[in-house]
Amino acid sequence: MCTLLASNTPVRGMGKGADGWFPVTRATVGYDHTTHSSEEHALLIDFTNYDLGLHARVAVELDLESGRSLLAHLQAMIERAEASAIR
Amino acid sequence: MWNSYSTGGPVGVTAEITTFAGGGDDEIHGYVASPVAETLRPGIVLVHHMPGWDEFYFEVAERLARHGYEVICPDLYCRFGHGLPDDVYAKVRTEGGVHDDSVVADSAAALEWLQARPTHNGKVGILGTCSGGRHALLVASVVSGFDAVIDLWGGGVVAAKEDATPARPVAPVEYTAQLSAPLLGLFGNDDQSPSPEQVNAHEVALKAAGKKYEFHRYDGAGHGFVYYHTPAYRPPQAMDAWDKIFRFFSDRLQS
């Protein structure tokens, strides 16, 4: 089914796409039809910079369990980074 | 019927990307597939699914053309930019989807494009899968001039008001009274959108409005059971669906 479930946020960083590294400006998280996974639906995470074109995109499709695990690790690493006071 | 042509007949097709005046007279792309025989033929507006104006739809256009139809598949995402279909799909997803009004306008323009063809026989059908099935039904409900509509597992035809989005503000079932073309609907009973309950609710609305329709529900099939490029593919159900598609269009467009 087409869920149209998606949300996005501005981000600042770099991503590596087919043409090498580029600045990413937006992250979109969705749960919808996959285009490449064997699953019918997946978490669709895109890091993009549409100022550079539609190809400026780093994409992953993850199952929900992987998404939860990634979220937990991301949260934990952010907390460790902040606690380290290293900038 | 699929694979039922005469080996001695003219069965070839031509296909190419063209540009035409879409909604708002914007120049947009259309994938056009036509029988090589220069005889009068019906038209079909092919409404692509949410993953975009992709190779599956190009191949469906060619398949329908091989069965005697002039087919145009407008690029409903043309205004979002160009790139690999999945990159375009990602952009559309980021922006909340293509607006129903945009799809209706481009499909109405595609209808006019077909009607202006010198080989047009006066009949036009419209078909879509998934979100394209929902859009095909929506278009046939709010645009006059279609002689047949086929909705293949369109999710969101029946939807709660709280599920409306800025891009999809009204569930097409709300326009049932305006539907002017006979409808063929094909669904998998394992689908979650549309669920069997939603298909039943749509059928109740069609009956109440006295509309001409045929619904077929397949056991052992879910969403996208005709998609031979995905794990959802169910060959027996898909081939039966193709037979029903060809028969429905033939009875209403080629007679």
Image (spheres, grey):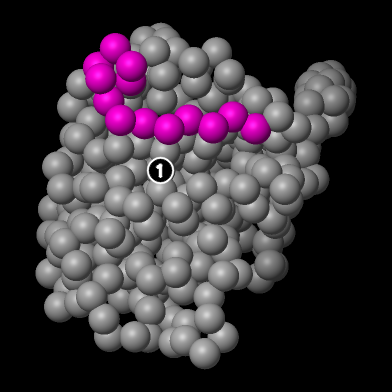
Residue B133 lies, in percent from the top left, at 43, 40
Provide the residue span drawn in magenta. Answer: B206-218
Q: Chain of mark 1?
A: B
Q: Which residue shows up at 56% across the image and 53% down it?
A: B242
Q: Quadrant of the C terminus of chain B?
A: bottom left
Q: Which residue shows up at 30% across the image and 46% down it?
A: B148
Residue B79 lies, in percent from the top left, at 32, 56
Which is nearer the eye, B95 or B172? B172
Is residue B16 visible to us here?
no
Asked where in the image residue A21 lies, by quadrant, the reply is bottom right
Is residue B1 visible to us here?
yes
Image height of B81 relative to B196, above or below: below
Classify residue A59 as left or right of residue B49.
right
Q: Amino acid at mark 1?
A: Ile
Classify residue B203 as left or right of residue B54.
left
Residue B80 among those drawn in magenta: no
Q: Which residue shows up at 68% across the image and 67% down it?
A: A18
Image height of B232 relative to B17, above or below: above
Residue on which the image places disc 1: B150
Label 1 element class: strand
